Every structure is written in structure tokens, then in C-alpha cells.
Amino acid sequence: MLLANSVLKSRPDTEILLINGVRESGIFHFPKGMDSVTLPTYLKTPAGEYLPHSLGCDLHRLVTLRSSIIYAALQAFRPDVFVVDNVPRGAMSELNNVLPMLAARKTHLILGLRDIIDEPQAVQRQWRKLNNAAAIADYYSDVWIYGDASFYNLPRACAFNNAVSDKVSFMGYLDATQHARQPQSTEPLLTKTSVPYILCTVGGGQDGYRLASTFAQANFPAGFNGILITGTMMPASEYENLQKIAARRDNLRVIRFVPNPLALLREAHSVVAMGGYNTTIEILSLNKRALIIPRVSPRQEQWIRASRLAEINLVSCLHPDRLTTQAITAWLTSSWQPENPRRYMSLNGLFTFSEKMNALLTQKSKTAPSVQCEV
């Protein structure tokens, strides 16, 4: 949505279709020119394997269903530009029948990558297994990395071949302060939280219970409240346990989902979080005082990013093996403050993205240009 809105700001006549697997996407307000198709969802196990989230246990059937929906949507929408997030062939290779169809229609294909995927050897193994380099060489015109090469040079670290590296552009990080305002406001929640508060967020919540429960039992500084967002993927039993913990204290609120967490993040005194890309970039964009306890399996992505950021004093970082209520309490009561991230890295990714997209759509010079984003 952040990327799509940046395009609409500079080019309001664009039509954008978001294809995603986020059930809550229907809650968000889409401006004129943007709409979405929500796919039946996968569940990712702690080992990194995919399973159907709700539709039985037949993974092959779910892959076929998702692939068919994507193919039908693209066949009807006929995008001029198709932006694929993170995985060149799509989750479970569900884009394998889509890519040739789009290439035959001369659709401009772009692969969007986060700054860090995993530790280099794991990336190389995974990309060889999925034959990603061939997909990029055969179908993609560009690889846009939402990061800064001076902080982490993904092609160099992972030894991408020239066929991939020659297509790479570093966009800069995405300034999350540019998120479009959502009608579903968090103002009532902020009104009820008049005293300073500490925000804890654990992403989707599927594997966030340990951090959430540790935070819920930590001692907050005098005069501070805590707000804990569990995420919609946290199992109901774990969410209920957190509510029971909160019921025993008068300075903690537990919430499953907030449409606009950026408003809560903006007003928070401090943040305790897992190290997902979006959360981390929001923290950096707002220059928030943050303690990140990153996921370290099945991928090292979050640990690499958070530990490197900690080395230059942009966040505090705690390895999950050292996570205790005492460790969180000690950090909350410390005087640590972050450096300004904008002194160390580019956060101009949205400007770069919209400029490049505008140039592409101008080149296409069609009556009703459109952008397709797969996220």
C-alpha cells in the first residue's frame, strides 16, 4: 500500500491491483484507482514450510487454487507493469504459469526485494533450489531492492551472477511516515492512554508469544503503561493467556489488531518489537527508541539486520536466547537513545520508486496505465 500510494500521488490516473494473502486487507481504505484481490492463505511453520491456513491439509490444491486466481486476475486486468514481492516465482512457485503469459504480453516485470533475505549461504542454496536466477534472467527487467547498499549490499553478499546483478537498483529504504492516513483511526485508543506508554508488537503473532508474554510480565517505569499488539495470527489460546496476564495489572492493554499501528508507534515513548522488515523500517522512519528481539530461525534475516543496526546505535538488539523479563525491564529503565537513521542511510525509497514507475508508465504511454503489485 505504501508503494502503491506513492505512485498514485505522482500519477493519479494509474490503476493498481494488489494481489495479496492478507485477510485483513479488506479493512483498509483504498483510494480511487486501487483495489485488491485477497487469496486463500498459507500458514508458514516454524521450520519455514508452507501449509494451508484454513482449507484442509491439501497443499497442492491450495497452490493450484491460488495460482488459478492470480492467473485469472492478471489475464483480465492486463497490467502494464507487474511488481512481484520477494520470491521470483511466487510462493510455492505459483507464478510459474503466470510469468510466461505476462512476458508474452510485453508486461514489464519487476522483482522487489528487501535489503536482507537470509545469511548468504542459505540464500544461495534456496535460489539454486528454486532456480530463481533463471526466472529473473528469463522474465524480469528489473530487480529493485528496498534498501541502501552502504548498509547491506545484497548482490555482493550473496554473490548474485551478472545476469541478476546487472538488473539491480537500490531504491533506498521506504519512509513509513508517508503512509496514507486510514479512516479507521487509533485516536480513541490514544485518548484512553493519556500517560506515556511503551508499545510492543510481534508482527503477525504466529511465533510471537514468547516475546509478548515476556513483555507482558516486565516491570514498566513508574508512570508508564504498556500496549501489546499480538497480531491476528497468534493462536487464540495464547492471546487469551496474555489477556489473563493483563487482567492482573492496571497498566497493560492487549490488542489483537490495529488498522493503523503507525499512529500508536508515532506516539509511543519506546518500542519493543520483533525485527520484521516493515516494523524495523517504521521504527527507523520515526527515529524511535526501540529494542528489537529478532527471529533467528528459520531465517537469519531479522538478526542480521537488527544486529547491524545496533552496531551503529540506531536500535538496541537482544538475541532471543537472552530474552527475559529482567532484560526488558533493564532496557526500559535505561537512558539509551538512538542516533538519527537519516545520517546513516537513505530513506528516499518511495521517491525513487515513484520516479522509476512514472518513467516506466510514461514509456508505455497507454490510455489507462496500470501497475500490478504482488505482495
Image: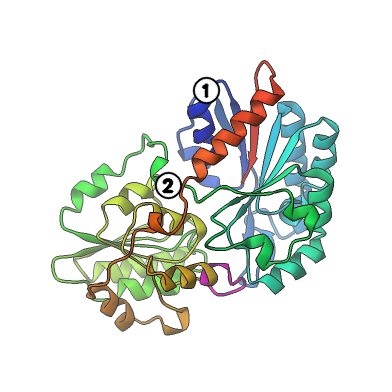
Q: Residue 259: which disc? A: none
Per the rendered image, the range of residues in magenta is 295-303
Residue bearing the label numbered 1: 12
The stretch drawn in magenta includes residue 300: yes
Residue type beneath disc 2: Ala
Q: Position of residue 243 (x, y in %)?
A: 33, 65
In what element is the residue under mark 1? loop
Considering only vertical position in the picture, is 206 above or below 25?
below
Q: Residue 176: which disc? A: 2
In the picture, residue 52 is in which quadrant? Answer: bottom right
The stretch drawn in magenta includes residue 153: no
The reply to whether residue 1 is in sight is: no
Locate residue 144 relative to residue 196 in the image: left or right. Answer: right
Mark 1 neighbour class, 10 Å CA radius: few under 14, some 14 to 19, many 20 or more: few
Q: Distance between the residues labelled 1 and 2?
A: 20 Å
In the picture, residue 38 is in which quadrant? Answer: top right
Q: Where is residue 346 in the image (x, y as percent from the top left)?
A: 47, 51
Locate residue 146 relative to residue 328 in the image: left or right. Answer: right
